[in-house]
Amino acid sequence: MFRFFNQLGSYFLLLKKVFSRPEKASVYYKQTMHELVSLGVNSIGIVTIISFFMGAVITLQTAYNTENPIYPTYLIGLGCRDSILLEFSSTIVALILAGKVGSNIASEIGTMRVTEQIDALEIMGVNSASYLILPKIIAALAFNPFLTLISINVGILGGWMAGTMSGVITSEDFIYGIQYAFIPYYITYALIKTLFFAFIITSVSGFQGYYVEGGSLEVGRASTKAVVFSSVLILLFNVILTQLLLS
């Protein structure tokens, strides 16, 4: 229990250091642009592929579980839409990014720690925590909502293609289903969750990498911890935010 509170206190002290006023805004701007590409643009591919196939699977499973003739077929499209909007494109994509982005951040900063590059920054008078972690947080908060919107559109497209090509639903019924009783707030809900999850992934992974002690083995362990802790916190905050935003 003591170790838990010690880690929690260190995490919040690191955040205080991260959000202190930067020395040179121009340097942070360049670093943030770099992180937008590294953490955001480079994640489009995996998000697109996984969203397409998950949309297809959701449609097919919904179709096979609603074969009773009393259920109208447009429910397949409605089920696909709501599943993607409410859970998949925010929570599941965040878990995927925790594995891809989180491990990358922890290993990058952890390697800088064990090779004493962070110590060199501190000697030069640079706020190393802010310089290394803040641009990653800003980049994730700025770009992850776009990844969520891409995931929503690609997921629904994948569901439509799977449903129509397999013959389980006509194109007209699927389109009617995704339009039926549409609640625009669901998109807002997904984007709000995405922002929370983006902050969790970058800050927790940065924390794990920043306080690495040892060598390359410890960097690997920190990378694993970053993914595990980020995933657990994402699932925890998913429950909390769902209760707050949808109740």
Image: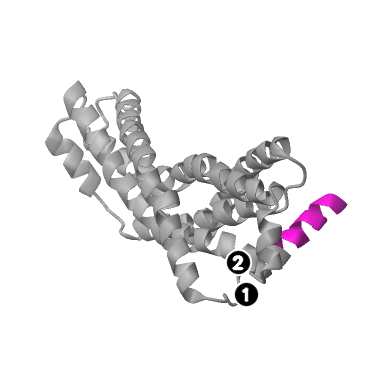
Q: Where's residue 112, x and y in %? A: 64, 50
Circles 1 and 2 in contact, beta carbons < 8 Å: yes
List x then y, in percent, for residue 123: 71, 66
* Residue at 48%, 46% in the rendered image: 94
Residue type marked 2: Ser
- Residue under label 1, please give it: 20
**Where 20 falls versus 160 (above or below)?**
below
Residue 204, compared with residue 125, is above or below; it is: above
Viewed as shown, does residue 79 lie left or right of 9?
left
**Kind of element beneath mark 2:** helix
Q: Is residue 64 left or right of residue 98?
A: left
Q: Earlier in the sequence, mark 1 or mark 2?
A: 1
* Residue 15 visible, this orientation: yes
* Cα distance between the residues tagged 1 and 2: 7 Å
The residue singled out by tag 2 in the image is 130
Q: Main secondary structure of the magenta part?
A: helix
Label 1 secondary element:
loop
Q: Nearer the viewer, residue 14 or 177?
A: 14
| Residue 167 appears in the rendering | no
Per the rendering, the mark at residue 185 is none
